[in-house]
Image (spheres, rainbow, N blue to C red):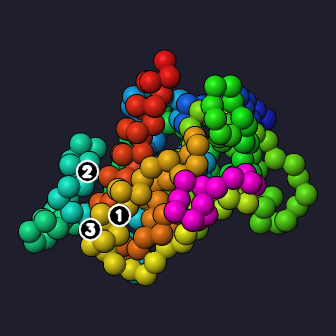
Amino acid sequence: MKLDENVITKAIIQRFTEKWLDHLRLDVAIVGGGPSGLVAAYYLAANGRKVALFERKLSIGGGMWGGGMMLNEIVVQGEAKTIFDGLGISSQPFQAGYYTADAVEAVTTLASKACRAGAKVFNLMSVEDVIIRQTEGRESARVTGLVVNWTAVEMAQLHVDPLTVNTQYTIDATGHATELMHIIEKKSGSRLLTETGKVIGEKSLWAEVAERSTLENTREAFPGVYVAGMAANATFGSYRMGPIFGGMLLSGKKAAESIIQRLEART
């Protein structure tokens, strides 16, 4: 078969445009493609929800790719191993309650499962702002959309206007930076649902406490916006956990299940 460069270009532009147009209105938008974001995307999409994940970098997977200090093995505890088992990610016992997994297998499988369940990943896109509206029947304003632009535009500091997507719920899974919550804090003029009304910030590394508090802090942090993974601890002011990823996985699942309950209650 003779290849036509024009057809190749047209195919890419047309198919991407179709995908983009189909995801301008979402049930859930996820900001950040690390482990908690990918897990949330999988469970939401598997439940039949329209989900898009926006990742500013070229690759998804967040800190899981590098394991600990570029040793591409990760650790999960027994409670989280059930998620790996359900997704077909192999793990090996190390000692009582601790399991190791290949970081590359974990990331690639999580990404594949999320995509095959129906979640769409838009990489190289950054969320630079939010849409906040007072909606009918609600006492407080809530996030109803995201303002996105190409990461390359942001990096080059070009003055190029962004585009928008509408969403019923959003998950901030941006990790330590807690990027979305900082934007909301700056732009909303309202208090966050934290003790101080602001992003409290993460504390030093304490795996035992951090793993537990990650789940406790996986909740709504502003009307319409949930925090998951390290963004949950950074928002509500708890510790970081280092290269153990069980809390991240369980956090993504909890965020998805919480939003599914909210969506079901609205129907």
Q: Where the N terminus falls, by quadrant? A: top right
Q: Is residue 242 magenta?
A: no
Q: Secondary structure at mark 1?
A: helix
Residue 55 showing in the rendered view: yes
Placement of 224 over or under 190, stated as above or below: above
Dot 3 corresponds to which residue? 75
**Mark 1 and mark 3 in contact (Cβ < 8 Å)?**
no
143 sits left or right of 128 in the view: left
71 sits left or right of 151 in the view: left
Spatial CA distance of label 3 from label 2 is 11 Å
Dot 2 corresponds to which residue? 84
Q: Which range is magenta?
A: 187-199
* Residue 69 position in % (x across, y down): 40, 81
What amino acid does circle 3 point to? Val
What amino acid does circle 1 point to? Ser
Rate crowding at label 1 as few (under 14), some (14 to 19) or many (20 or more) other CA atoms within 10 Å: many
> Residue at coordinates 50% horizontally, 36% vertically from top-left?
119
> Residue at coordinates 28% horizontally, 44% vertically from top-left?
87
